[in-house]
Image (cartoon, helix red, strand yellow):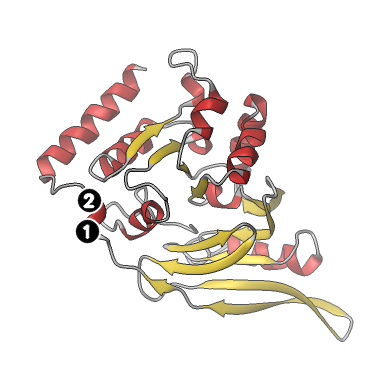
Amino acid sequence: MGGGGFTAEPHNPALDDFILSLAPSLEPRILFLPTASGDPNGQIAAFRATFGDRSCRPLHLSLFRLEQDPHDLRELILSQDIIYVGGGSMRNLLAIWREHGIDAIMREAWETGVLLAGISAGAMCWFAHGITRSAGRPEPAPALGFLPGSLSVHYDGDPIRRPAFLDAVARGAIPDGYGADDGVGLLFEDDQLVRIVASVPGTQAYRVQRTTTDGASTVLETVLEPQLLAAVPSLRSRDVPEDIREFRAERYGAAARRR
């Protein structure tokens, strides 16, 4: 996802419901990794408040708190139906994952059919390259390489990220790839793009390819129109009053702070 989901669109569940709908189980196990932002309590609380009301079994993994809540990381990750990676710094995310061996575990999960999802840094990390703002200004950076090519997120929401991406592709610094507006998701089966979806109207994805004209390298942007999603009421296990949701968000946030 180029942006959106429960951290950016708390009142628009279309993308999160779509992710759940892709799992083979009626009550999928979904694991949230907020590593890229340093495991903040706010993200964890928002995840718990959002997915706690749905027909799924939500868990989160805080790598910054493993001494207080240890896990067999391989066993935990491979037991899930869905891995959902939050946004933040892609460079920091990958450095921490590699330190814990999670990069190799994620490849094993991908190869065995676990659904891998993410927003922003959590979306770019699956590609060969992304455009990160880990050091401030946007610049190309290598990622895990499960998917070929490159991805730039927040295509409509971060005005300096898009030109940095186009320049990097034009120079050949990173391979051809995709740009995704906030609220747009790209669905891949194996390494093939099979569907583009959006949670809000008017958003788009783009195919970005290097081309040469009169000996000069430039880029070609091709608009890829997404399918507009609607929320799926059947994925919600029951109607939960707003005051109960607020209580759950506060409870999960307090639990995270205690850890």
* Label 1: how many Cα within 10 Å (few below 14, some 14–19, many 20+): few
Look at 52% across and 32% down and name the residue there: 77
Residue 253 in the image, given as x and y percentages of width and height: 29, 29
Residue 226 in the image, given as x and y percentages of width and height: 46, 74
Asked whether the viewer can see residue 134, the reply is: no
Look at 38% across and 47% down and name the residue there: 25
Q: Are the residues flagged by discs 1 and 2 in contact, CB closer than 8 Å?
A: yes
Asked whether the viewer can see residue 22, the reply is: yes
Residue 185 in the image, given as x and y percentages of width and height: 47, 62
Is residue 221 placed above or below 230 in the rendered structure?
below
Q: Which residue is mark 2?
A: 236
> At label 2, which amino acid type do we have?
Arg
> At label 1, which amino acid type do we have?
Pro
Please tell me which residue lies in front, 232 or 14: 232
Q: Is residue 123 left or right of residue 233?
A: right
Q: CA distance from mark 1 to mark 2?
A: 6 Å
Disc tally is: 2
Look at 35% across and 36% down and name the residue there: 58
Is residue 62 placed above or below 159 in the rendered structure?
above
Residue 182: which disc?
A: none
Quadrant housing residue 101: top right
The secondary element bearing badge 2 is classed as loop
The secondary element bearing badge 1 is classed as helix
Residue that lies at the very extreme toward the right in this rendered image? 215
Residue 210 in the image, given as x and y percentages of width and height: 76, 73
Is residue 252 placed above or below 139 in the rendered structure?
above
Residue that lies at the very extreme toward the top in this rendered image? 67
State which quarter of the image contains the C terminus: top left
Is residue 109 placed above or below 211 in the rendered structure?
above
Please tell me which residue lies in front, 157 or 64: 64
Look at 58% across and 73% down and name the residue there: 206
Q: Which residue is mark 1?
A: 233
